[in-house]
Image: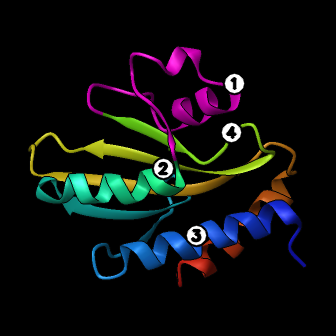
Amino acid sequence: MLDPNESDLKNICRELLGSFHGALSWKWDSRFETVLAEFSVDNKGSVRSILERYLSIVWDSSNIGKAPDTVRTIASHLGGLGSGQLLFASDPNQDAFLFGAWWPWGDGKTISLRIAPFDKKSSDAEMAELIKLFKGWFGL
């Protein structure tokens, strides 16, 4: 049985998937334990607009130092935020929330979007179970 926080995450994931249906194709990125979609910079406006509906808090390299500790930890795990890279979050004040990493490629033509849950209070085993559920919500 999902706890209320996980139920909220599941609902956000379902809404994200519905909003991105046909626009993005998701695959699993085992390196960062995230779902991953790659898209053309031509679509960045529409993708960002949809993303910000669900992950409305955004950090970049200029303000990540003022982010909550958990958000800075996530950014560090992902290799930090460079120029043009963004980190989106649902509500990082919740124990469990979703984050999205926006990484423009060096070729200037493609952007990668990685999304995953983060739970401040989960043990490693509980986090592994949440990741398993999360993959299922994305059909992976």
- The CA distance from mark 2 to mark 1 is 16 Å
Q: Which amino acid does label 4 sit on?
A: Pro
- The CA distance from mark 3 to mark 1 is 24 Å
Looking at the image, is mark 4 or mark 2 nearer the viewer?
4
Q: Is residue 129 visible to us here?
A: no
65 or 53, which lies in front? Answer: 53
> Height in image: 140 above or below 79?
below
The tag on residue 92 is 4
Q: Does the magenta stretch include residue 68?
A: yes
User: Which of disc 4 and disc 3 is earlier in sequence?
Assistant: 3
Of the 4 image quadrants, the one containing the N terminus is bottom right
User: Which of disc 1 and disc 3 is earlier in sequence?
Assistant: 3
Residue at 37% over, 73% down = 20
- Helix, strand or loop under label 4: loop
Looking at the image, is mark 4 or mark 1 nearer the viewer?
4
102 or 14, which lies in front? Answer: 14
> Height in image: 58 above or below 50?
above
Identify residue for label 1: 69
User: Which of disc 1 and disc 2 is earlier in sequence?
Assistant: 1
Identify residue for label 3: 13
Q: Position of residue 30 (x, y in %)?
A: 51, 62
58 or 133, which lies in front? Answer: 58
Q: Is residue 106 magenta?
A: no
Q: Position of residue 111 (x, y in %)?
A: 24, 51
Q: What residue type is labelled 3?
A: Cys
Packing grade of label 3 (10 A; few <14, some 14-19, many >=20) is many
Residue at 49% over, 42% down = 88
Packing grade of label 1 (10 A; few <14, some 14-19, many >=20) is few
Residue at 52% over, 32% down = 75
